[in-house]
Image (cartoon, helix red, strand yellow):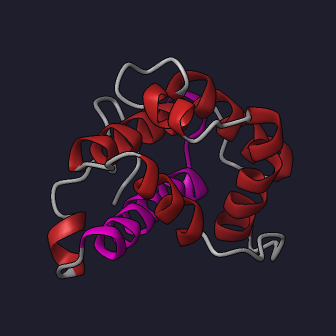
Amino acid sequence: MGDLADRADVEHLVRAFYAEALADDLLAPLFRAARFDLETHLPVMVDFWTTVLLRSGAYRRDPLAPHVALAALTPLTGDHFAAWLALWARTVDALFAGARADAAKTQAVRIGASIRRHLEGGPASEYGAGLPVRTAGSTGGN
């Protein structure tokens, strides 16, 4: 198992994650509320994660805006954020290992905490505490 090396790897990760998220009992209703279209959204998310992990500069949007719009349609709870992060970490661990895979998990916690803080208010430290970066069997560090 190798590390995330290029856009194709990131696309593989993002596609695998969304395949699971769209079938998840807690997360799937959020996607239905947003009228989520995977094939439209996928290139945007690949741009986002290649920018975060590979410094591609491909993502030039506001990552908070879609989450604000979603929160206007349906509540986003701490359980949603925890489920998203746990699923992301499991998906990363199942497919990749290495520094960028570890960064994908760490950055997801940071990004999730930031989005949650913006949606709910309160200190950022409150929202990142206890969120999973590593999963059982993970070899990655925080």
Residue at (58, 33) in percent of width and height: 17
Magenta span of residues: 94-120
Quadrant of the rendering where the N terminus is positioned: top right
Where residue 80 sits, quadrant-wise, is top left
Residue at the far front in the pictured view: 73
* Horizontal arrangement in the rendering, residue 15 relative to residue 123 (left or right): right
Residue at (45, 49) in percent of width and height: 73
**Does the magenta run of residues contain 107?**
yes
In the rendered image of this protein, does residue 37 appear above or below residue 105? Answer: above
Between 111 and 50, the one lying in front of the other is: 111
**Does the magenta run of residues contain 28?**
no
Magenta portion: prevailing SS class:
helix
Q: How many numbered circles does the render carry?
A: 0
* Horizontal arrangement in the rendering, residue 28 relative to residue 10 (left or right): left
Residue at (28, 44) in percent of width and height: 82
Residue at (48, 54) in percent of width and height: 102
Would residue 22 be seen by someone viewing this image from the given angle? yes
Measuring from the top left, give residue 37's x and y in whole percent.
Answer: 73, 35
Measuring from the top left, give residue 79's x and y in whole percent.
Answer: 23, 41
Where residue 97 sits, quadrant-wise, is top right
In the rendered image of this protein, does residue 129 appear above or below residue 3? Answer: below
Residue at the far bottom in the pictured view: 123
* Horizontal arrangement in the rendering, residue 37 relative to residue 100 (left or right): right
Measuring from the top left, give residue 12's x and y in whole percent.
Answer: 74, 35
Quadrant of the rendering where the C terminus is positioned: bottom left
Between 113 and 30, the one lying in front of the other is: 30
In the rendered image of this protein, does residue 54 appear above or below residue 36? Answer: below
Would residue 134 be seen by someone viewing this image from the given angle? no
Where residue 41 sits, quadrant-wise, is top right
Measuring from the top left, give residue 20's x and y in whole percent.
Answer: 53, 23
